Amino acid sequence: MVDGNNLCYRNEDGGKRHFIGLMALKVLVPRLVETFDVSIVFDPGICSQLKITEDILQAMFPEARVQVMPPDLTADHTVLAEAEFNTETYVISGDRFKDYREMAAVRENRVLHVVLHRDSVQIPQLQILLPII
């Protein structure tokens, strides 16, 4: 489970978040699907922010399942809920999920943290380091 919106922002100096769009996901998802079944979950506003439809977003990642949450739900809870009862499901996100400590994926350390650098995306637990082009 990939927290899609979370990977669309890179943290800048001073705690500011910089929107990078789908750049990190475009290089990361093809690498992940070589080994894993991948689902990408986005917050409701992503299509309007990117100025694309949900169908176009899915077409950009044909090898993954793409889901955009309805207006009353967030991706955070959804990705964690998907991993709640399946111990083989991991969550990929830069989020620490402080508001969801009771969820199984957080309790059981099944959240794999993404590090977005200016020119690369990294998942240390999977030994993945890819350039962002």
Image (cartoon, rainbow, N blue to C red):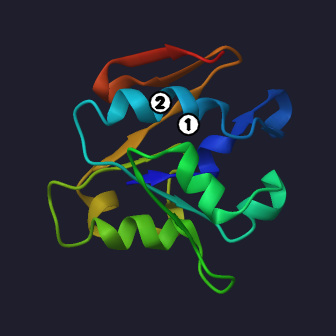
Give percent across and percent down for residue 22.
66, 39
Q: Kindly tell me whether residue 101 is visible in this rendering.
A: no
Amino acid at pointer 2: Leu
- Mark 1 is surrounded, within 10 Å at the Cα level, by few (under 14), some (14 to 19) or many (20 or more) other residues, namely many
> Element under label 1?
helix
Indicate the quadrant where residue 24 lies.
top right
Residue bearing the label numbered 1: 25
Measuring 44% from the left and 36% from the top, which residue is drawn there?
Answer: 29
> Element under label 2?
helix
Give percent across and percent down for residue 48.
82, 63
Measuring 38% from the left and 23% from the top, which residue is drawn there?
Answer: 124
Amino acid at pointer 1: Leu
Measuring 24% from the left and 41% from the top, which residue is drawn there?
Answer: 36
Give the number of the disc on residue 28: 2
Indicate the quadrant where residue 81 lies.
bottom left
Q: Quadrant of the C terminus?
A: top right
Would you say 94 lies left or right of 100 here?
right
Q: Are marks 1 and 2 in contact (CB under 8 Å)?
A: yes
